[in-house]
Image (cartoon, rainbow, N blue to C red):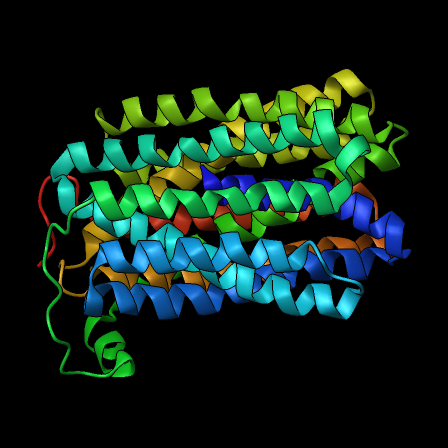
Amino acid sequence: MFDALDVGLLSFIMPLVHQAWKLTNSQTGLISSVSTIGMICGGFYFGRLADRIGRKRTLIISLLTFSLGNLVLAAANGFVYFLIVRFFVGMGLGGELPVAATYIADLYHDTKRSQMLILADSFWAVGWLLASFLSFAFSASLGWRGLLIITAFAGFFALMIRKNIQEINEPVKQKTLFVQTLRKNFNSWTAFLWIAWLTVMFSYYGMFMWLPSIMLDRGNSVIASFGYTTIMVVAQLPGYFAAAWLAGKIKTKYVFAIYMAGTAVGAVLFGQASSSAAVVIAGCILSFFNLGAYGAIIALTPSLYASTVRGTMTGTAQAIGRIGAVIGPLFVGILIDHQIKIAVIFGIFMAALLIGAIAVLMLPAVDSKEVK
């Protein structure tokens, strides 16, 4: 929830920073991309750290990294300063997500694990709703700096983790280096997993980080665009719940493939939409399916690896995927600057989504037993 609150607020404050500092669309896209570069580094570093010192300690460190970092970010006095601090905030975010998934994967097994991971990821939608509400209610009065300060309160949750969460599997002293661990656990379906992560992150961040800005460009006010985006975010929750239910009926990789195909349909509809009503409907379809796909791939990944390397491999998969998240927003900004039509841009996302759906079908079905 706190991760999504941070990422969601970044999406909403991007138009405000864009206007305040008179940035180009490419520079605005770079804000999201630099944050994601930090998340890549955080996934590699904190994922490995979770296997070495434990999930609990790593969760606390990563949470404090991005929450306290936002206090510093609120004082940014220029574009370059903003980018540098946002990189470190991104590191904390990129570390917390795979470590949290790894912890939940340690708690549950088989189909129950997939369902609980998807339901846990549904709190991403709750965080986005909070971000939407805060932006809608307070962006005019607090500005982007005030909104960032609000996210710093997530740091207090570290105290809750310290008191109430216990280690499930004690960390094992690692005798191999990160590269050696990666090489030992890499196989053909790991490559397909990384492709799936690349496409889901490329599409998610490329589309959703630009939704408020696209709404503004189509003639809506800042407040109206935030309101429309909030409606779209609400559609994420039933998407997650339906995916969790479906994961109890069929293999998780099939859930992912179905939801990626549904997202591709939503991308086409959004690119062709002309009226506000059509945009909102298409956006709801995007939210329903894309976030359900996101939950499914998070549920699938930890189950592919043994617990002793689960943090490392889960963090690595998400970090690899975030390369797509770096390219996505920057890609959209560059194309918009070159006056490429939104329909063409979202058509490219449709192709990427279908590639991801095919890639995940090549993975083994692990819902019925744990990979050793």
20 versus 181 height, above or below: above
- Which image quadrant is residue 249 in? top left
Residue 50 percent location from the top left of the image: 25, 63
Foreground residue, 319 or 324? 319
* Residue at the (55%, 33%) spot, across then down: 128
* Residue at the (60%, 60%) spot, across then down: 35
Residue 352 percent location from the top left of the image: 56, 50
In the image, 216: left or right of 5?
right
**Can residue 195 be seen here?**
no
| Quadrant, the C terminus | bottom left
Single out the residue that lies furthest toward the top: 277
In the image, 53: left or right of 13?
left
Foreground residue, 101 or 148? 148
342 versus 228 height, above or below: below
* Residue at the (54%, 59%) spot, across then down: 89
In the image, 314: left or right of 126?
left
* Residue at the (20%, 54%) spot, across then down: 304
**Can residue 149 be seen here?**
yes
| Quadrant, the N terminus | top left
- Which image quadrant is residue 136 in? top right
Count up the numbered dots: 0
166 versus 25 height, above or below: above
Residue 51 percent location from the top left of the image: 21, 65
- Which image quadrant is residue 175 in? bottom left
